[in-house]
Image (cartoon, rainbow, N blue to C red):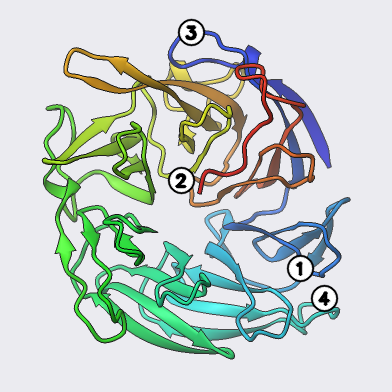
């Protein structure tokens, strides 16, 4: 396991303005080809382990255990949206996985103390299409996020209910909604809605049998002329969509990374939606998560981008992927009213890191701050937060915003 210090204060700042922040150290967990990544206590010893590709890594020394033999294609394992869930409710956390090339959704049963590949058994949830994006959510309102929401290309959206290891599929829509997926209570009725690239599907009282109305909200949002059309099939491919109040007006907004035109956010106002591109000349950033990394109460976007130009390269690593941090500095007067000001900075440059959604914010070492874990064709990486506190606020680093 190798590590190299990378101080944010000395990192390249895309906006051109230096800023004090927390030091991160890039720790290489493995050089083996990987896929999506999950952080979960596999063996119930009270410590968080890392799972990616065909291997899970036992904390705290990251001892590798190969538990399956998925094929490696184009330098990465065909594993997307790896999600931890005790599917069969036996007390051991299992893994849900999506295979784009394999065109199926599966779950892998954690056998308990037997850690070899012969003991882990995969079972098909649904075979359909080249699936990549899925999230867990409390769709049925029972207080537990055990329902699987999946974007199924060419087939629409669906959610899956599991009982004792058996899955039932429920359709949300058969419409092609393009890429992008998120969940959250957008209208404040206490039910979990589903977010897509063109708008949001409103959860009905009975999500099993009722129609999910589509609100083409940000799909028709007005915005700067250099923004793309937000319709299925346009050149903005969104990844994970995050529901959070960005501008502090009491209305939830939508924040997302995307390929083609970089990170965007959709501002909700009482009279409609407005779309914005995040400032700072950000490169494309499809994989993203929302966290309050600087502890100032404003949600930020952490994303994996491709270092495509001089502004986003770190010296000596022109082909690296960049883990960047879009800092929400709060509201500023912009001539058209108050809206958040953003600046961007690079946390790390890691060669061949996967674009997403393979990055997670979690306190991996249980020291009270937020670390980042990512994976890709060149291996598994831990961006360890070595800060005892946040210099910008004087307070501790915050937990993941959502």
**Labels 2 and 1: the sequence-earlier one:** 1
**10 Å crowding of disc 3: few (<14), some (14-19), many (20+):** few
> Circle 3 sits on which residue?
17
In this view, the residue in front, 312 or 264, is 264
Would you identify the image quadrant in which residue 262 lies? Answer: top left
Q: Nearer the viewer, residue 194 or 259?
A: 194
Q: CA distance from mark 3 to mark 2?
A: 25 Å
The residue labelled by disc 4 is 115
Q: Position of residue 102 (x, y in %)?
A: 47, 74
- Looking at marks 1 and 4 on the same chain, the residue that comes earlier in the sequence is marked by 1
Q: Which residue is mark 1?
A: 42
Q: Nearer the viewer, residue 138 or 113?
A: 138
Q: Is residue 22 visible?
A: yes
Q: Assign a secondary structure to mark 3.
A: loop
Decide which of tag 3 and tag 1 comes sooner along the chain: 3
In the displayed structure, 5 sits above or below 219; it is above
Q: Nearer the viewer, mark 2 or mark 1?
A: 1
User: What number is the disc on residue 171?
Assistant: none
The nearer-to-camera label among 3 and 2 is 3
Earlier residue among tags 2 and 4: 4
> What secondary structure is marked by label 2?
strand
Q: Which residue is mark 2?
A: 287
């Amino acid at each position: 396991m190798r590590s190299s210090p990378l101080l944010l204060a000395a990192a390249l700042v895309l906006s051109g303005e230096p800023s004090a922040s927390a030091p991160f150290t890039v720790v290489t967990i493995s050089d083996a080809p990987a896929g999506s990544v999950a952080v979960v206590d596999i063996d119930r010893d009270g410590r968080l382990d890392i799972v990616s590709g065909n291997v899970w890594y036992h904390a705290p020394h990251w001892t590798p255990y190969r538990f399956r033999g998925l094929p490696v294609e184009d330098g990465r394992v065909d594993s997307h949206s790896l999600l931890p869930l005790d599917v069969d409710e036996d007390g051991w956390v299992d893994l849900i996985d999506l295979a784009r090339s394999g065109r199926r959704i599966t779950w892998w049963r954690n056998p308990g103390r037997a850690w070899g590949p012969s003991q882990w058994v995969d079972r098909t949830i649904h075979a359909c299409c080249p699936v990549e994006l899925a999230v867990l959510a409390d769709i049925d309102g029972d207080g537990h996020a055990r329902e699987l929401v999946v974007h199924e290309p060419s087939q629409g959206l669906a959610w899956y209910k599991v009982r004792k290891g058996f899955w039932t599929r429920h359709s949300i829509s058969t419409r092609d909604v393009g890429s992008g997926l998120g969940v959250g209570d957008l209208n404040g009725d206490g039910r979990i809605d589903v977010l897509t690239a063109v708008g949001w599907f409103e959860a009905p009282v009975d999500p099993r049998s009722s129609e999910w109305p589509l609100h083409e909200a940000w799909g028709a949002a007005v915005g700067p002329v250099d923004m793309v059309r937000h319709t299925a099939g346009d050149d903005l491919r969104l990844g994970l969509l995050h529901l959070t109040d960005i501008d502090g007006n009491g209305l939830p907004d939508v924040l997302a990374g995307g390929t083609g035109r970089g990170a965007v956010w959709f501002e909700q106002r009482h009279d409609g939606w407005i779309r914005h591109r995040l400032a700072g000349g950000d490169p494309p950033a499809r994989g993203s998560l929302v966290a309050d990394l600087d502890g100032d109460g404003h949600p930020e976007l952490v994303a994996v981008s491709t270092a495509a130009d001089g502004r986003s390269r770190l010296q000596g690593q022109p082909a690296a992927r960049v883990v960047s941090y879009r800092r929400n500095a709060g509201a500023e007067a912009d001539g058209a009213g108050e809206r958040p000001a953003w600046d961007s900075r690079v946390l790390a440059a890691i060669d061949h890191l996967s674009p997403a959604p393979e990055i997670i914010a979690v306190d991996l070492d249980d020291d009270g701050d937020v670390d980042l874990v990512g994976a890709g064709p060149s291996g598994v990486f831990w961006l360890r937060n070595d800060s005892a506190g946040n210099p910008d606020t004087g307070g501790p680093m915050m937990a993941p915003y959502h």
